[in-house]
Each structure stands twice: as structure tokens, then as C-alpha cells.
Amino acid sequence: MGSVILGLFLLFLCLPVPKFDDPYSTVLTAKDGELLGARIADDEQWRFPATNSYSPKYIACVLEYEDQQFFRHSGFNPVSFIQAMVQNIQAGEVVRGGSTLSMQVVRLARKNQPRTYREKLIEILLAMRLELHYSKKSILDLYAANAPFGGNVVGIDAAAWRYFHTTPDQLTWSEAATLAVLPNSPALIHPGRARERLLDKRNTLLLRMTTSRVHAPRRFHLPKLSPDDYELALLENLPDKPYDMPMLAYHYLMLQEKEHKGEQIHSSLDYHLQKNVQEIMERHHQMNAMNQIENAAVLVYNYLTQETVAYVGNNPTAKDASMIDMVKAQRSTGSIMKPFLFAAMLDEGTLLPTMTLPDIPMSLSGYTPKNYSGQYWGAVPANVALQQSLNAPFVYLLKEFGHQRFHSLLRRLSLKGIVFDADHYGLSLIVGGAEASLHDLVHAYGRMGRKLAAAVNEEFDEEVPDNVVPFSADAVAGTFDVMKGLTRPTNQIGWSGFSSAKQVAWKTGTSFGFKDAWAIGLTDRYVVGVWVGNADGEGRPGLTGVGVAAPLMFDVAGILKDSYTYPAATAAAMEVEVCAESGYPPSEVCPHTKKVKMPNVELKTGVCPYHKKVFLDSTRQYQVLPDCYPVNQKVFETYFVLPPVMEWFYKKHSSMYRPLPALYPACATAHPDEVMAFVYPKSDARVSIPIGIKGNRQQVIFEIAHRNPRKTIYWTLNNRFLGTTRLNHQMPIDVEKGRYELRCVDEDGVELYRRIVVN
């Protein structure tokens, strides 16, 4: 007999333990636990991953309603089962179930098989097997996570949100009682379906809870419903139709679901910031849509904690492509990467913050950069070139730095859109020739911010290794200080007059053809990145970084409780003396100097090349050369002398510029490069004949810059005289395809020539 019992017990142990293998919804919550969004499970059910964290009130209500003896049986309660059978026979119908909570868990796991005596026996056996394998708490968790709550809502976590817009651990007595009775009659939750019966069931259970005698171990801390709480619970209304699932971070949820499908994702997103950013984007979208600009993206990143706090991948109300995540999309960068080059050259000592750079039409390695405005200033300080995002000076800097080295630096910044080799991009790398994503750019600027914070922020004591950020803290500080001085967009005029105004170090970018508008701003802890455009790549007039991206960026930065207050240099920076006018280390003839801070590296710029000692005649009206004027009558003055093309553009905008005096009549002709230079064409250039609107060939216009525009210049092409110019040295020429030699001679005999190929 003993062996038979042992055999039956071993056979019992061989029974499978009921398990649930249903798919779960992917659920995204904010840092404070607020629900940001969810994706329905693959079987079209709202079944949240179980948190197993719910109110003791809910446990008390479930046990009172479903299984008062839960803690006293081992899966099957024969007393309750017999009582249910007697009552059902007397009523002639099923009026009471005899199933324990454990049996109900088995029934849920077996997908609600038809109610037969055979099935009931299976449920009893498996319930007992369940009790042997799981603790009572685990069985309660299985029931709460898989019970049906009407429609396609499964589990207490989804039900608490859908019906009461709360979490299971925050349920009131009324809410707990409602959810306790629902699995028994889940159809009652829907409006119009005998809601009075649901109300009656809830109120009946609440009344029972005032005298409940459910016995549970002390560790469960089951509460008692007091008379006062009972009266208050009766006053609460039943839920109306289920709440719609929020969609405050759709693209971030889609991104996370790739690796965490069917999981509860506790993100670092700030619920209120995320919501406010979406509202700000909607306001801007209403304005931009009038210009057929449909898409935008905003990313806010706390670079101190390395946490994403707001992520909106696209305008939720955009007509087209709103489902495309533009935070991760690779787009043309425009000028948004210029600060990287600025910082890199500060670090190697080949650039000083106010150093004069050429801003002229130029042809470098076959590439001809143009400023966005179409204007050139001739000569500009480096910081002004960055603040005004001038293309020509930065293409010049990239030529000096080397596009291969800059390409390598961008790779170190983890810009994944740099997919071709350096020569594919050439010098266009600095003005939008490459692509990057908003995500990668924001994180690149964020790493720079961490490097600076580690050096100057006393509350941030983490070290940032050099292999993570290819810039020194001082290079970052100097670059960000320049970015802090950018002129704000028109909607920010007068911002500094407000006591609540926040300082931001920022930069914009606009891609060729007005297809992408960028703005990135930094405070002491945040990077705010913005992209605006059309996902399909359609360009629109006025789609610029300053015009549409920067206003959105500043509105987002304005709701952050932070500002940019970091210094322009760290304690490790060195102070150097520079020429006040050129920004270079002073030569012996620089009249005025000033001090600037820079990284503690060896300077490689050379001394000021623009201040020169110029010898004059005794009247100081003419410039003289050593062999054409008496030595004892010569005097000298210091002049700020720019090369001819730089001077030609510079003096248009600078009334203070003092050009060199004319040569003394008896002196020999000066070197041509000191007197005049071609603006167009450049040396040995290929010239394309412009085509008019009607398809007709236009004239080619050649141009020369002369130190003295009043001088007459004589033009010849292949020894054919073309004419003369004075003041405005431009010569329109009708030419056919072929090879030519262009010669220009001024009235003093200074001669220039160019070999050109006309296409």
C-alpha cells in the first residue's frame, strides 16, 4: 500500500506546473514612474509586464471575493466545493463557483477550457501541483498579472491604468473592489452593459470588506475597511470608457522596443519636460507648416548624468512621415560641426580666439566655398567667423588643419554618418558635405560638456578620459565661450534684459538647398538639440538654423532650470599676449596688444603677418623703396596691411582701414602680389560659362582687386585687347570653350596673368 501511495505521489510530481507564455506589451515609464507610452502585445491584448507591486487593499478585496480560505488550503478547498455544488443543485443553475484562487490561476493558464467534470478534476490536480511549486505570494502575483478585466485588458497593471489612470499600488478601496469583481464578470466594465450590476457587485463587496474575516500572514499587512472609508468609497463613480494609452515618447519607445520587447522600460525621461517639449513643438509646427515644413525633432540630454531627459523624434501632428524618427536619421550637417574644428585648432596651437582669418572668395583643392549671405568681409577674427558661421574662413582653416585629420577626429566623436573616406568629402566636410544624426551630434557636444564640467564644476567630480573627448577642457571652454556670444534669433531680441533670462552656448547649421535646419545649445548640465526640415528631403525657402531651429531650441532651453555659467578658461590655461588688431602673437611693430587665454600648448601661429613697417617720403604722402629715395629723408609708420583681395573686401566694411600710400613716382614697380590680385578666376582655373533662364549662354565676369582702385587696368585675352577698367575692376567677356591666357596690366606696369580653361 505504501509503495502505491509513493508511486501516486511521484506520479503527481510529474504533473507539469502551469505556466503562462503569453506575449506582453512593451511599456515605457518616465523616471518618476509615470506612463509615457505602451505597445500592445502581439496577441492584441493590453497585458503589461507584471510589476507584482499592488495595493494591499486589492489583495484583501480579491481574497474576500474569490477565496477567503486561500491561506488555509493547498490548492483545493473541499468544503467550499461541496457547498457550491449544493447551492447550484438547489438553484438549478450555477450560482456559485467552488474554485479556489489557485484553481482559477490554472484555468487562466489553460486558456479557459470548457467547464466539464474532467476539466475540473484536472484543475484540482494542477492547482495542488501549483501550490507545491509556488509560494502563496507568487500565486497571487500570477492571478493579478493574468486575470481578464474586460475587452482586451489583461492583468492588474494594465487595468489600473486603463480604467483609473493610476498604478496598482495607488488603488483606492473603491478601485480595488471594482477590479476584484471584474474578472468574474469582465463584460460589465463597458458603458451600457448593465453597469448597475457592476456597481451593485462593487458595493456588495465593499460592505463585506467592513466585516471581512480573511486570515492572512502578518507579512501581507491586509488592511481593514473602516465605516468612514466605506462611506467615502461608495461615493466614488465607476470608471467610464478606458483611458487611451499615452503616446508621449513614441519614437523613444520604438527605439527601446528593439532590445526590450515585452518589457517594462524604466527610462530617464522627465515626464513633464517630455510633455512640455511636445507642446512647444506643436506651436512651432503650426507656424512652420504654413511654409510646408512638416518635420522636426528635439533631444534633451543631461550630459552630467549621461541621461536622455526628453526625446521627441518627430512632430506628432505632422501630415507626412511623423512615424520616422528624425533623432536617429542621418542628415546633412551644414555648419553645426564648425566648433569641433575650432576647438581642435585651439588645442594644437594653430589658432587663437581672435586671430584674423581670410574671408574672401577662394578656390582650395578645386573646392570653392561661399558664405551663406553671399557677402565677404575680407578679414575676420576667428571668434566672429564662428559666431557668424562664415564658410570661407572655416574652409581655409580646414585646409590648414587637414581634412584627413578632421575626418579622423569626427570618427572619434562617434559620428556614425561619416561613412566614406576623407577624400570623398574633401573640404566640404566642414560646411555640410557629410551627414550626422541629431542623436550623435548631441552626444558629441555632451561629451565636450562633461570634459569642461570635470574641470570647472565643483559638484561634478568625475574624470573624463582623453580618449572619450579629443579636446582639452580649455579648448572646450574657449569654444563654448565664443558660442555663448552668438546673436540670438529675432524672437529672442532683448532677452538679456530679463532677470530670468538664461545664457546658452549655441550653434546653428543649415544644409545646402535649405533642406536641414539645426540648432544645438548647452547649459551647465544639458544639451538641447533640434533638427527641423522635411523627412523626404524637400528644401524650403527660409528653412535655416537661425530662422526655424534656433527659436525652437531656445523655447525648450527656456523651460530648463539651468543656464550656461562656465568660465572661458580653466585654471590650467595660459595667458598670452596678442596683437590687438590681428589676434596673432605680436611682431616688433604691433602698436597695441592685449591678453587672451588659451590651452597650455606651444603656439604655432607665428607672429602677426599684417603689421608692417612702411617707409614713406618726407611728406608722408608716398611709399618709398630702399633704392629710390634718400635714406636720410625717409620716415616710417606702422600699417595694418592685408593682401590685395582681403583688403579689397575688408575696406568695404571698415571705414577705419588705412590703405597703403601710392608708390613714390621715382620708385620701381612693386611686386604684383603686393598691389593687385585676381578675385576671379583663381590660378589655372576651370571656368564654366553660366547659362541663363532661357538656356542662352551668358558672359563670364572676371574681377581684380587693386590696392588703389583709381588706377586704370588694361585687359587682354590671348593678346586680344578687351578694354580698361577703373574703380570697379570687373570685365565681362564673351568666350567659347577652350584655353586662354588672361593678362592685366595697371598704369604703373604691374602685371598679372592667368591660364584658364573655359568649359
Image (cartoon, rainbow, N blue to C red):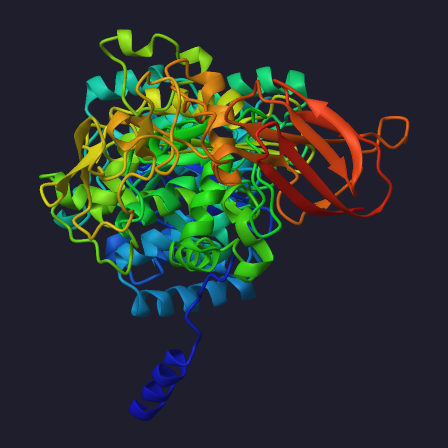
User: How many labels were placed on the picture?
Assistant: 0
Residue 684 at what x, y percent from top left?
66, 49
Q: Is residue 472 left or right of residue 374?
A: left
Q: Residue at x 47, y 44 (%)?
A: 396
When the figure is inspected, residue 643 is found, relative to residue 395, above or below; the finding is: above
Give the quadrant of residue 677.
top right
Residue 261 at what x, y percent from top left?
48, 55
Give the quadrant of residue 409.
bottom left
Q: Nearer the viewer, residue 707 or 504?
A: 707
> On the rendered image, what quadrant is the N terminus found in?
bottom left
Residue 192 at what x, y percent from top left?
60, 22
Q: Residue at x 42, y 45 (%)?
A: 397
Q: Nearer the viewer, residue 47 or 574?
A: 574
Residue 82 in view (yes/no): no
Residue 4 in view (yes/no): yes
Q: Nearer the viewer, residue 501 or 130?
A: 501
Q: Is residue 708 left or right of residue 583?
A: right
When the figure is inspected, residue 693 is found, relative to residue 468, above or below; the finding is: above
Residue 319 at what x, y percent from top left?
67, 27
Q: Residue at x 27, y 19 (%)?
A: 502
Q: Nearer the viewer, residue 606 or 187?
A: 606
